[in-house]
Image (spheres, rainbow, N blue to C red):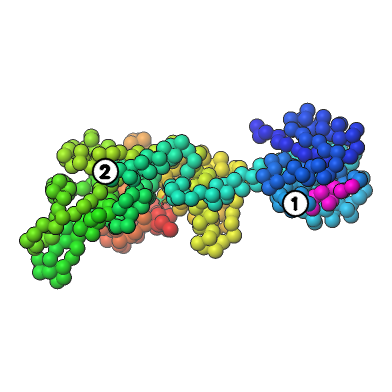
Amino acid sequence: MMMPGRVMLVDDEAMVREATSQWLELSGFEVEAYEAAEAALARITPETDAVLLTDVRMPGMDGLELMREALQRAPDLPVILLTAHGDVDMATDAMRAGAYDFIEKPYVPDRLVERIQRACEKRRLTLENLRLQQNLASRSGLDARLIGISPAIQRVRNELLALAELDTNVIIYGETGTGKELVAQCLHDYSNRARHHFVPINCGAIPENLIESELFGHEAGAFTHAAKRRIGKFEYASKGTLFLDEIESMPLNLQVKVLRALQEHQIERLGANAPIPVDLRVIAAAKVDLRDDPNFREDLFYRLNVSELHIPPLRERIEDVPLLFAHYVHRGAVDHDREPRTLSDHDIDALQSYAWPGNVRELKNIAIRYAIDPRASLVDLLSRQQQMQFKPVVTRPNLPLAVQVADYEARLIREALEKHRGNIKAVMEALDLPRRTLNQKMVRYGLNRADFTEE
Ligand SMILES: Nc1ncnc2c1ncn2[C@@H]1O[C@H](COP(=O)(O)OP(=O)(O)OP(=O)(O)O)[C@@H](O)[C@H]1O
Ligand SMILES: [Mg+2]
């Protein structure tokens, strides 16, 4: 049940005022009654959490003027006018001047309650949207970058600021799309290394034969295609921050080389004779606990895991969803030159009951689609999103093998599309599929590249 809300009632006639107050209070409203328009007006601010119910004919400032003045101070304030029977012309003028509603006296009490209730609901939504916007505007520094009001995200922000100063290696843990790279970038930006480079490396994605020259560089002529000297990522990151993304997918032979470089604080370019000193802070990101991973070297783990930072999934900080969504709807509208769209109560409920398996990245994509297409309903976008999530194969053991296989295939392709943000070439490589076959399969499974790309 919705709270009925507050009413500012203005009527110069004591009898009417008291009777109306009493009726509204019995119906659950909080009532502030005023004998004169001026007194009510003095209380109105843009944040006034009430609706204004006023008589029109009053000595001194009348109801219409009160309305005009009130709307100057609180542009969206719902104003309901109590008009004398038959005063239709005045009522139409008033509606044109911005009145929310008018009610003829003598009024039918139940109808009055119903209409005030609607006005209160509207007021609540206006204030909610205002609050979201102000929240966005007033946030500066870290809370403007790592958005959220939940205790969990506040804890992440505080830990981040404390760790930024420490200069120790950090592993950031979190599910896909929770903001690991964003947090790593912030750790760098708020550290003493901020003036130097932040260098991300995707540990699973570098082709085996390029690893050494990518990471450590090479001299001209070091191998057949090495025409020019190349500075590797480790050297480039020196004095700055090296971000080892998806560290759990780092091949064992690479782990050995990385460990050695970190232990010795130096690297060797391929084909060079002398080692080069490097001053590195390493931030790594992982989706799984590396302690349990037999394929990850313990010595490297302990070198990296000096500090840990855990980012909880969005479903465990659902309070953050409306704010994050409003943020990205706003950004989508600005970037694509669209009219701003607001959210209804129903929308906010829908957003908060969705599970967000793709976390903030998924939310951001939906928010931007919502901002761009004024006809898209949020509930439709969310249910489409839900349909795209396939049930795990194990829950459908009674289906024919072919169906289970197809299910599994669709899921793998979908996961690859997610992982590579809709980059078809990367998916072709990851799954070792020719373009034509991939296209056919995507059509068959209703997978749409655009649903995976990131703004
Ligand atoms: N708290 C937040 N406030 C604002 N934007 C956020 C927040 N968390 C994540 N994002 C945004 O969500 C998107 C995904 O975040 P990011 O790439 O950092 O996730 P990730 O954990 O590295 O994901 P993956 O494991 O899939 O690589 C980015 O566009 C990022 O800017
Ligand atoms: Mg990432």
User: Looking at the image, is mark 1 or mark 2 earlier in the sequence?
Assistant: 1
Residue at image position (16%, 70%) is 228
Residue 61 in the magenta stretch? The answer is yes
* Residue found 71% across the figure and 49% down from its top: 74
- Work out which quarter of the rendered image holds the N terminus and state it: top right
Residue 272: tell me if it is visible. Answer: yes
Residue 198: x %, y % from top left: 30, 55
Residue depicted at 16% across the width and 61% down the height: 217
291 or 68, nearer to the observer: 68
Left or right position of 364 against 276: right
Instruction: Write down the region rendered in magenta.
Output: 60-68
Please tell me the numbered disc located at residue 439: none
Front residue (pair 261, 122): 261
Residue 49's image quarter? top right
In-image side of 6 versus 171 (left or right): right
| Label 2, residues with CA under 10 Å away: few <14, some 14-19, many ≥20 | some
Q: Residue at x 33, y 54 (%)?
A: 194
Which of the pair 228/344 is nearer the observer? 228
Say whether residue 153 is left or right of residue 412.
Answer: right
Residue that sits furthest to the left in the current view: 273
- The residue lying furthest to the top in this view is 26
Q: Report the amino acid beneath label 2.
A: Thr
Residue 196 x/y as whole percent: 29, 57
Residue 407 lies, with reference to residue 417, above or below; the image says above
Q: Marks 1/2: CA distance?
A: 55 Å
The disc label shown at residue 71, or none: 1
Check disc 2 and report the residue beneath it: 168
Which residue type does callout 1 highlight?
Answer: Leu
- For the stretch drawn in magenta, the main secondary structure is helix
Place of residue 413 in the rendered image (x, y in percent of width and height, measured from the top left): 33, 51
